[in-house]
Amino acid sequence: MNELLEVDGLVVDYGRARALDGADLRVAAGRTVGVVGESGSGKSTLGAAIGRLLPRQARVEAGEVRVGGERMLDLRPAELRRLRRGRLGFVFQDPIASLDPTMRVGRQLRLVLGRRGDVAAHLARVGLDAARVASAYPHQLSGGMAQRVAIALAMAASPELLVADEPTASLDAQVREKVLDVVFALAAEAGTSIVWLSHDLPAVARRCDRVAVMYGGRVVESGPAAAVLGAPAHPYTAALAGSAPAAAAPGVRLRPVPGRPPVLTGPSPGCAFEPRCPFAEERCAVERPAPVRVGEQDALCHRAADLVGELEVVA
Ligand SMILES: Nc1ncnc2c1ncn2[C@@H]1O[C@H](COP(=O)(O)OP(=O)(O)OP(=O)(O)O)[C@@H](O)[C@H]1O
Ligand code: SF4
Ligand SMILES: [Mg+2]
């Protein structure tokens, strides 16, 4: 499979706090991947690292990120800008913060599209009234409208890969679905791959081809959405899936998994899920699990091969 995005063994620290502890991710061209996990599992850090957009206090300690085969971490600033502009798009949770407050919306879009681009058409594509919105400043827009503008900006250059970090978290339920419809429709039309970082497992199950489950700064299970959620190979996926996908009704929140997620200050000595795992064995606390291919998915669990098919996904 020709991979558009390859993340290998990525380790990122914020001072003494370890946010990514060897994260791996593969995304093929045109695929949609939902990255799910509890708060603090490292989703935003992974998303930012893909575009080398990490905050200043973050340090990449190990690992590699390749976009279309280009090693992101080695690129010089000019090459990095070219690659970001040509191949990548980003949409973040807070749309207002990602827009330039001093510039009218139409002008911001014009800068991305160039002189010949059709600003009105790009606003219409995301369901906005171009006549009204083009002349507005970001602070004059509602959250839903601002997020549509951010999506129009991100998609204007038909990126090969869109990284969307909780793009609808600040929106109400009805607007949320509409905004997601727009993102996925535009991406399908342009052949754009999506990495969608989200808490909302049922929504990811409905929209994405593939799912990557994060825990303790690693992707602990990944594969086709139906396989990962229907027959998880990792106990954390089973716990997180709780009510999905059978009861994956819109708006159903995940049941919290008992116990607390880890706070890492260095490499986890074993499996980070060990303190909460009902299937843990002695080696789980001291041996880091390596990826195991089970059926169609990859899982970071010593017992994945015996557990797949046994893990109950109960409501
Ligand atoms: N700017 C920062 N400075 C210090 N620590 C940070 C910073 N950003 C994230 N962290 C820490 O890194 C870890 C991973 O955080 P991250 O934001 O990537 O997780 P997340 O999965 O996106 O969480 P959420 O679901 O809450 O958005 C957490 O322990 C978090 O406290
Ligand atoms: S490696 Fe061990 S502790 Fe970790 S999920 Fe698998 S069985 Fe549970
Ligand atoms: Mg986040």
Image (cartoon, rainbow, N blue to C red):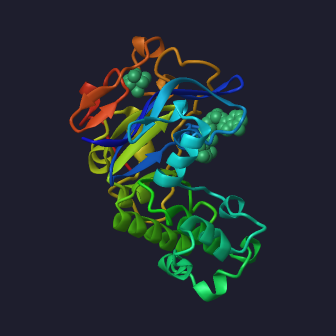
Return the residue found at the far right.
Answer: 102
Image location of residue 62, percent across then percent down: 53, 22
Left or right: 201 with respect to 16?
A: left
Residue at figure coordinates x 56%, y 55% from the top left: 166
Image location of residue 298, percent across then percent down: 31, 33
Residue at figure coordinates x 56%, y 81% from the top left: 128
Residue at figure coordinates x 65%, y 80% from the top left: 134
In this rendered view, identify the residue nearer to me: 180 or 256: 180
Which image quadrant is residue 76 in? top right
In this rendered view, identify the residue nearer to me: 262 or 23: 23
Q: How many marks?
A: 0
Return the residue found at the far front.
Answer: 115
Return the residue found at the far bottom.
Answer: 131
Dividing the image into 4 quarters, which one contains the N terminus? top left
* One can see residue 247 in this view: no
In this rendered view, identify the residue nearer to me: 268 or 73: 73
* One can see residue 4 in this view: yes
In this rendered view, identify the residue nearer to me: 194 or 222: 194
Above or below for 16 versus 219: above
Above or below for 132 versus 242: below
Above or below for 170 versus 129: above
Residue at figure coordinates x 70%, y 76% from the top left: 141
